[in-house]
């Protein structure tokens, strides 16, 4: 009897010794994941992991299927959020102190320069990877079968990524920030071009009102900085976090990532990289699909082969995600160690930057703005975003989901579009650079003609015509979607390159920065 | 059990991450300034002889340093590398360990004035490249001031009179050159001066982007721009019409002075000026200040390539004997429209009436004789007859509409307002030492009436 009842001190002693186990057990409800059961339970019970299924399809884990690009974009968001919080500790959003606090970050804060670089580059990296992720989703035909709305949310996330980057660009209050603010506020003001032509500006100056709303005045100043800061650290992060949550939730609800209908492990080229499912044993019978939260919509639940091709998410998915995270972190830190985020002279309203450029990701827009402010900054971007957003609704061909380019035909269309698009766009730009446009030929021409007929509009028409021609000639809306998106990518890349590298003072053409008139 | 691909990716990434973070940590823990401070400590210990100093050297802690300047509301971190600035034991060491030269720090406590108020550069930077801010890629408006021009900073708080006796000789001499080379003939400063060139107010504190550096050799800084611009204006600014003649040393001194013309005032408590009442300068000084750049000694009139016109010889006796003081005063006050000669009155180039009178009397000192009186009736001019003569005899040099060429521009206020006696005498007697020959009966044979006709035609321009 004395053996079975321990004294209080002994119990206490045992509790101390068993601290590790009891902590683990309290954290992992189902204990250390040693069995399939406990591995599944780990996924389901964990707040952060439960948005993913207990089992994951092998195709999802194929590195060459997703290239992890959406995940990388998300991790860059996490990295930029954390480093942003660190930068925020030192930054002071006032025009007196903003610049010097950023300088202090560079000079005296321990690892401050690295912190700021990481924040900057992971933020800009998001743009790259959001676009790449979007390309992956489009080319693998993954915006179908219930995922149409998630594509729309993805477009919203793309726009938010741009705006977050832009607002961050304006905070150091150096020459780049100041003149980017000027440029962007002028872009915002551009509906004035239309109201000027219509003679309405004196009655209702929409552009002017938009500009004043953004700048909190007519020129960038203290109130602007306050406003942009609020957007950058509070409003936009809240919105983007919400939409990221919805985006992930819908991935799960829409049945996970797409996979080819006739997926088999035998013809899987990435076979060596994956764990093959164990078909016997475990807690799952082979004839049933488990959606542990709910049944997924769209796919039929009772398909044997689906469950055949799944593996347990813990540890297969977990280790894949962890490795991509560490890779992203290492890449961002590595890049940040050797490339400094730009910081120019303190903002000076009397010394215009020439050329005054928006941040690089908007220079494609600025190139089009140089043809026509209203078309380049409002109409064409809006139409592009609208066109991208409508892709899943205009291409409702449900075949070949989860296959890169939907097979060889799509690959051919993509390559053909890439070549035709590049050649035609470069040709058109070369024409504009060499011969100018209406204003150079007929200096007194009405602005309405330039607004209606300018290279940007012609290009948009060409892109639409090409996509429709592809639909007509291939008889497939899916091919049209590939053509349209490829054209979008080509235009974004080439225009951004031209705006960034080939445009110098007075927005004139230069083959390289080294030819700019030295100042 | 796990996929080998992701496991190895995780492992490799983790190793790379570890290496990068260690590298970052090492780099952060060993900044550039630490090397300098360590070396400073070694030298300090080596040079310390008394036990007291030895103890101090021993106690010197390597770490971040900055001087907070209350009056200027900024920090200077220069002593993070220049650690021995106030240490007499370091007088013989090399920069950056060296003690500050001279006794400047005694009168200008570093804790109150800091460094960048005199030396410029980026005070809050903690590495050499960005602190000195030389070169455009450092993105700082005011790179460190070369020591040869350091005196340009003294004028922020001290007047020239004080500086001439207390170690500000270079900038004082620069100022003298500025006054004697006629710079104000074209450049306004504090509202005084011509308007052919740019106004010079605040030029010394203008950011580097105000200076087009395309044709500047060597270091692309404000001082090199100014120096090379004084050596050869058209090398730095090809379209420049600036006339300048000075030795290389003079150009350096003038550069120092120009750099001292700043708009950013130091706090009131720092400024130490003895204000002296402004007195009108004598005619000679004023002539040097405003006129000499174009008119030189005023003896020869010559066509100037850059101004694209002939500069009249205003101290030429042949001119002075026919031009009375009233005429001279009128020309200086009104200027000569259509020529580079500006109006010098208070409301334009900023000279007071007294100063103009002083200049006139200085010029008039050269007048040794007065011209022959005019006997003809100056009212009886015939414009048409005058036009005929003008087109044959005068248009070659003065242009068919009097717009000037080899000869002076006649279509301006000064000629319109000039009294007819002066014009008559000039045409009759010519201008010795200039291409203008005497047209009178003793010279090229125009009768008095013909000259009167020409004058009446000239007045119509």
Image (cartoon, helix red, strand yellow):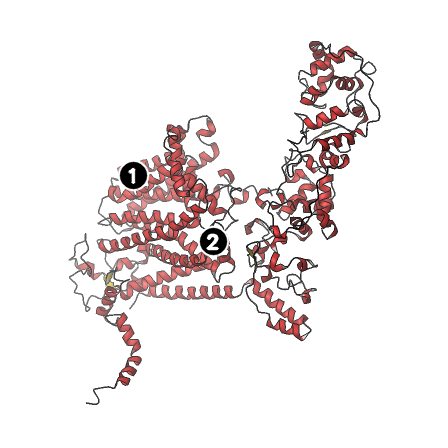
Residue at the spot x=51%, y=66% of the render?
A: B29
Q: Which residue is mark 1?
A: A470
Q: Dot 2 lies on which element?
A: loop
Residue A255 visible in the snapshot: no
User: Where is the N terminus of chain A found, in terms of image quarters?
Assistant: bottom left
Q: Quadrant of residue B197?
A: top right
The disc numbered 1 marks a residue on which chain?
A: A
Q: Which mark is residue A341?
A: 2
Q: Are marks 1 and 2 on the same chain?
A: yes
x, y percent for residue B157:
65, 50
- What is the C-alpha distance between the residues marked 1 and 2? 43 Å
Q: Is B268 located above or below residue A426 in the figure? A: below
Q: Earlier in the sequence, mark 1 or mark 2?
A: 2
x, y percent for residue B19:
45, 66
Residue neighbourhood size for the residue with mark 2, other residues' Cα within 10 Å, grouped as few (<14), some (14–19), many (≥20): some
Foreground of the two, B285 or B247: B285
Residue A120 visible in the snapshot: yes
x, y percent for residue A183:
44, 41
Q: Is B419 located above or below residue A372 in the figure? A: above
Q: Do the CB atoms of the residues marked 1 and 2 lie less than 8 Å apart?
A: no
Residue neighbourhood size for the residue with mark 1, other residues' Cα within 10 Å, grouped as few (<14), some (14–19), many (≥20): many
Q: Dot 1 lies on which element?
A: helix
Foreground of the two, B187 or B384: B187
The disc numbered 2 marks a residue on which chain?
A: A
Q: Is B69 located above or below residue A220 in the figure? A: below
Q: Quadrant of residue A92?
A: bottom left
Describe residue B163's horizontal placement relative to residue A190 as left or right: right
């Amino acid at each position: 009897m004395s053996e079975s009842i321990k004294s209080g001190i002994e119990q206490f002693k045992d509790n101390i010794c068993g601290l590790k186990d009891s902590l683990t057990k309290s954290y992992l409800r189902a204990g250390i994941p040693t069995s399939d059961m406990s591995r599944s339970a780990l996924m389901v019970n964990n707040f952060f992991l439960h948005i993913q299924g207990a089992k994951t399809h092998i195709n999802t884990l194929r590195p060459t299927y997703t290239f992890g690009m959406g995940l990388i974009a998300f991790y860059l968001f996490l990295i930029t959020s954390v480093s942003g919080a660190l930068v925020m500790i030192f930054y002071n959003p006032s025009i007196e102190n903003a610049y010097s606090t950023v300088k202090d970050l560079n000079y005296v804060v321990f690892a401050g320069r690295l912190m700021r670089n990481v924040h900057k580059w992971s933020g800009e990296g998001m743009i790259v990877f959001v676009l790449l992720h979007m390309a992956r989703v489009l080319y693998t035909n993954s915006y179908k079968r219930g995922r149409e709305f998630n594509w729309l949310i993805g477009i919203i996330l793309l726009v938010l990524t741009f705006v977050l980057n832009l607002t961050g660009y304006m905070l150091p209050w150096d020459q780049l920030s100041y003149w980017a603010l000027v440029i962007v506020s002028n872009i915002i003001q551009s509906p004035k071009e239309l109201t000027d032509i219509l003679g309405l500006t004196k009655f209702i100056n929409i552009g002017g009102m938009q500009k004043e709303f953004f700048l909190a005045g007519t020129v960038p100043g203290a109130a602007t900085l306050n406003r942009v800061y609020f957007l950058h650290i509070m409003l936009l992060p809240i919105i983007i976090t919400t939409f990221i949550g919805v985006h992930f939730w819908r991935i799960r609800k829409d049945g996970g990532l797409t996979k080819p209908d006739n997926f088999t492990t035998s013809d899987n080229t990435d076979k060596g990289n994956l764990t093959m499912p164990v078909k016997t044993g475990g807690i799952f019978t082979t004839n049933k699909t488990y959606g542990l939260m709910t049944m997924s919509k769209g796919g039929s639940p009772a398909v044997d082969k689906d469950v055949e091709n799944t593996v347990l998410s813990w540890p297969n998915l977990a280790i894949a995600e962890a490795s991509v995270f560490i890779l992203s972190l290492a890449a961002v830190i590595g890049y940040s160690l050797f490339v400094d985020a730009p910081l120019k002279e303190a903002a000076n309203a009397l010394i215009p930057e020439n050329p005054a450029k928006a941040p690089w990701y908007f220079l494609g827009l600025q190139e089009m703005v140089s043809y026509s402010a209203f078309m380049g900054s409002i109409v064409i971007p809006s139409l592009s975003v609208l066109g991208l957003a409508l892709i899943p609704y205009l291409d409702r061909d449900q075949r070949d989901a989860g296959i890169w380019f939907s097979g060889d035909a799509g690959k051919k269309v993509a390559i053909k579009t890439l070549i035709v698009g590049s050649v035609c766009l470069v040709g058109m730009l070369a024409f504009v650079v060499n011969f100018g446009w209406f204003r150079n030929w007929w200096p007194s021409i009405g602005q309405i003609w330039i607004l209606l007929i300018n290279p940007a509009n012609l290009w948009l028409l060409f892109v639409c015509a090409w996509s429709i021609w592809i639909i007509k000639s291939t008889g497939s809306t899916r091919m049209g979607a590939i053509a349209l998106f490829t054209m979008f990518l080509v235009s974004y890349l080439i225009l951004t390159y031209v705006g960034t590298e080939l445009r110098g003072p007075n927005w004139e053409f230069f083959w390289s920065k080294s030819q700019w008139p030295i100042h | 059990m796990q996929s080998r691909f992701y496991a190895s990716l995780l492992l490799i990434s983790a190793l790379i991450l570890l290496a990068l973070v260690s590298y970052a940590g090492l780099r952060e823990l060993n900044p550039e300034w630490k090397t300098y401070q360590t070396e400073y400590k070694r030298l300090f210990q080596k040079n310390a002889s008394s036990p007291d100093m030895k103890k101090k050297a021993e106690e010197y802690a390597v770490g971040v340093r900055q001087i907070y300047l209350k009056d200027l509301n900024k920090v200077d971190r220069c002593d993070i590398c220049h650690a021995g600035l106030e240490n007499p034991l370091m007088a013989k060491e090399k920069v950056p360990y060296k003690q500050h030269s001279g006794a400047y720090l005694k009168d200008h406590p570093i804790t109150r004035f800091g460094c960048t108020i005199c030396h410029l550069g980026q005070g809050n930077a903690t590495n050499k490249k960005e602190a000195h801010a030389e070169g455009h890629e450092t993105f700082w408006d005011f790179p460190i001031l070369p020591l040869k021009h350091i005196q340009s900073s003294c004028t922020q708080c001290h007047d020239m009179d004080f500086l001439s006796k207390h170690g500000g000789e270079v900038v004082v001499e620069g100022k003298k050159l500025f006054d004697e080379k006629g710079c104000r003939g074209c450049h306004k400063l504090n509202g005084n001066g011509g308007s052919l060139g740019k106004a010079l107010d605040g030029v010394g504190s203008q950011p580097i982007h105000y200076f087009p550096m395309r044709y500047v050799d060597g270091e692309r800084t404000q001082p090199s721009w100014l120096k090379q611009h004084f050596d050869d204006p058209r090398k730095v600014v090809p379209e420049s019409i600036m006339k300048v003649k000075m030795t290389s040393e003079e150009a350096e001194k003038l550069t120092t002075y120009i750099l001292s013309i700043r708009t950013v005032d130091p706090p009131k408590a720092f400024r130490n000026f003895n204000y002296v009442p402004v007195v009108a300068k004598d005619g000679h000084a004023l002539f040097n200040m405003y006129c000499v750049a174009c008119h030189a000694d005023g003896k020869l009139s010559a066509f100037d390539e850059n101004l694209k016109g002939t500069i009249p010889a205003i101290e030429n006796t042949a001119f002075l004997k026919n031009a009375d003081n009233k005429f001279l005063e009128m020309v200086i006050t009104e200027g000569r429209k259509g020529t580079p000669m500006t109006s010098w009155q208070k409301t334009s180039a900023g000279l007071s009436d007294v100063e103009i009178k002083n200049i006139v009397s200085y010029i008039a000192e050269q007048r040794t004789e007065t011209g022959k009186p005019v006997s003809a009736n100056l009212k009886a001019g015939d414009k048409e007859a005058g036009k005929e003569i003008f087109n044959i005899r005068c248009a070659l040099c003065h242009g068919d509409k009097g717009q000037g060429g080899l000869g002076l521009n006649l279509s301006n206020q000064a000629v319109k307002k000039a009294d007819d006696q002066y014009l008559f005498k000039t045409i009759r007697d010519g201008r010795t030492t200039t291409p203008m020959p005497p047209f009178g009966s003793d010279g090229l044979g125009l009768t008095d009436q013909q000259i009167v006709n020409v004058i009446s035609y000239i007045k119509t321009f």
